[in-house]
Amino acid sequence: MTTPRWRTVLFDLDGTLADTIPLIVASYQHAFRHVLGEEVEEARARAWIGRPLLAALLEESPEHGVALDLAYREWNLANTAALIRRYEGVPELLEALAAAGVRTAVATSKRRETARLALEGVGIAGAIDVAAGLEDTERHKPEPDPLLHAAASLGVDPADCAYVGDATVDVLSAKAAGMAAVAVTWGAGERNDLVAADPEVVLDTVADLHAYLLGRPRT
């Protein structure tokens, strides 16, 4: 029998539970090409992942941010089914956590409806719910507000939670919320950047995450 390290584990969505990275990058590239006639390199687009969409686009182009947001969302929705992918082992991880009595939920910068569609797209909508989406807080990652909202909605102490994410903003948000920050490298973030953000651990595979979350308790 394994002993969970935490009784509540919150997850980022994009690049953590669902492989939406190619979809997101392509959506950014389409929006900039359609609105500005500009080509966006993948590394530039990946750097925006984890932040609220409109805020990132307005920062890049204050004049055209709203139009970019609209073009992104339309293309993203139309291509979600074709481009979204499942990370092998994630459904089994969520099942094992539930069997061990661990509560799980999603805290994401996506809108709730978009997050629900993504969870459905990778077949885990019935295994995990969205506890915090874009609409739930005024401030977003790397601020702690979404994670604190998620903990409050579950009625748990943030200090008793871990937050799992693939981007530096996830690590920073978890630390600001007083949660254990667990970083994973199969999403958008670069390993060196994640290490530099100083999470509790950096893990490279879903199997590693499974073993870590359901391993020995902290000392």
Image: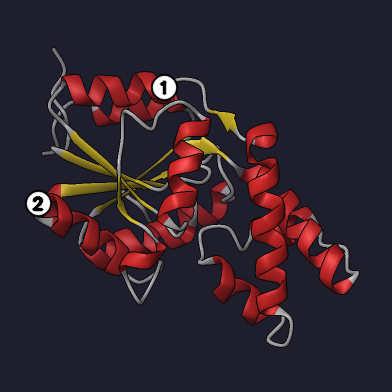
In the picture, measured across the screen, residue 34 lies left or right of residue 137, that is: right
Q: Which residue is mark 1?
A: 207
Q: Residue at x 29, y 29 (%)?
A: 212
Question: Where's residue 136, x and y in %?
Answer: 31, 66
User: In the structure shown, which secondary structural element does the residue marked by tag 2 occupy?
Assistant: loop
Number of residue marks: 2
Q: Residue at x 16, y 55 (%)?
A: 153
Question: Which quadrant holds the N terminus?
Answer: top left
Question: Where's residue 138, x and y in %?
Answer: 35, 76
Nearer the observer, disc 1 or disc 2? 2
Q: Residue furthest top?
A: 1
At label 2, the amino acid type is Val
Q: Residue at x 49, y 50 (%)?
A: 114
Q: Earlier in the sequence, mark 1 or mark 2?
A: 2
- Residues 209 and 155: in front is 155
Question: Which quadrant holds the C terminus?
Answer: top left
Q: Which residue is mark 2?
A: 156
In the displayed structure, would residue 140 be above or below residue 112? below
Do the residues under discs 1 and 2 have CB atoms within 8 angstroms?
no
Q: Residue at x 51, y 65 (%)?
A: 51
